[in-house]
Amino acid sequence: DDEHLETPYVVKFHKHYLLAPTQQVFTFSHPNHERPLDNSRYKRCVFKRDATAGSALLHGLAGYFESELYGGVILSTHPPTHTPNMASWFSIFFPLKDPVYVPAGASLEVHMWRCCGSHKVWYEWAVTSPATTPIHNVTGRSYYVGM
């Protein structure tokens, strides 16, 4: 059913394979002095893969969180900078309704949106290369965080 395949899941990755190095997607600064205040974001990412990389079946996208709280104090779920012994924060998994076949050496193009409404925040995501998926979770229809 669509609802469960459009819901991002907080997970601790155990058995997974990263097809390409991670990329920074969204950045936030606090306090936000923008006027009008808008925490919506959009990012297009192209994940270049080594020409010798084998083919793969992409089931979803991994998301990590990294935050500098104050004075160099960092909380991170990102593997290269993961906070030691931290068990209160986990990564996020954005599933795809239908897996995407990624040919050997092919790059992957992904679009991510962080959307804000008057009373909710949600994410939308889509793959546009090597195949095109629909945009997942349009208008937060399957998952959102209430405000």
Image (cartoon, rainbow, N blue to C red):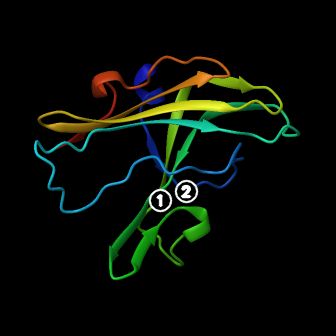
Vertical position of residue 14 compared to residue 50: above or below: below
Q: How many labels does the image show?
A: 2
Q: Which residue is drawn at 64% across and 25% down?
A: 99
- Horizontally, residue 33 falls left or right of residue 98, namely left
**Residue receiving disc 2:** 12
Residue 84 position, x and y percent, is 54, 78
| Residue closer to the observer: 83 or 111 | 111
- The CA span between labels 2 and 1 is 6 Å
**Residue receiving disc 1:** 90
Label located before the other in sequence (2 or 1): 2
Query: Residue 142 is drawn in which quadrant?
Result: top left
Instruction: Using the rendered image of the protein, determine whether residue 98 is visible from the camera's viewpoint.
Output: no
**SS of the residue under disc 1:** loop
Q: Which residue is drawn at 54% across and 31% down?
A: 110
| Amino acid type, residue under disc 2 in the picture | Lys
Q: Is the Cβ of the residue at disc 2 closer than 8 Å to that at disc 1?
A: yes
Q: Could you tell me which quadrant the C terminus lies in?
A: top left
Residue 22 position, x and y percent, is 60, 51
Q: Which residue is drawn at 14% across and 45% down?
A: 37
Vertical position of residue 28 compared to residue 139: above or below: below
| Residue closer to the observer: 87 or 106 | 106
| Amino acid type, residue under disc 1 in the picture | Phe
Residue 106 position, x and y percent, is 76, 30
Vertical position of residue 1 compared to residue 12: above or below: above
- In this view, the residue farthest toward the bottom is 71
Packing grade of label 2 (10 A; few <14, some 14-19, many >=20) is: few
**SS of the residue under disc 2:** loop
Instruction: Using the rendered image of the protein, determine whether residue 84 is visible from the camera's viewpoint.
Output: yes
Residue 94 position, x and y percent, is 50, 38
Packing grade of label 1 (10 A; few <14, some 14-19, many >=20) is: some
- Horizontally, residue 122 falls left or right of residue 54, namely left
- Horizontally, residue 23 falls left or right of residue 19, namely left
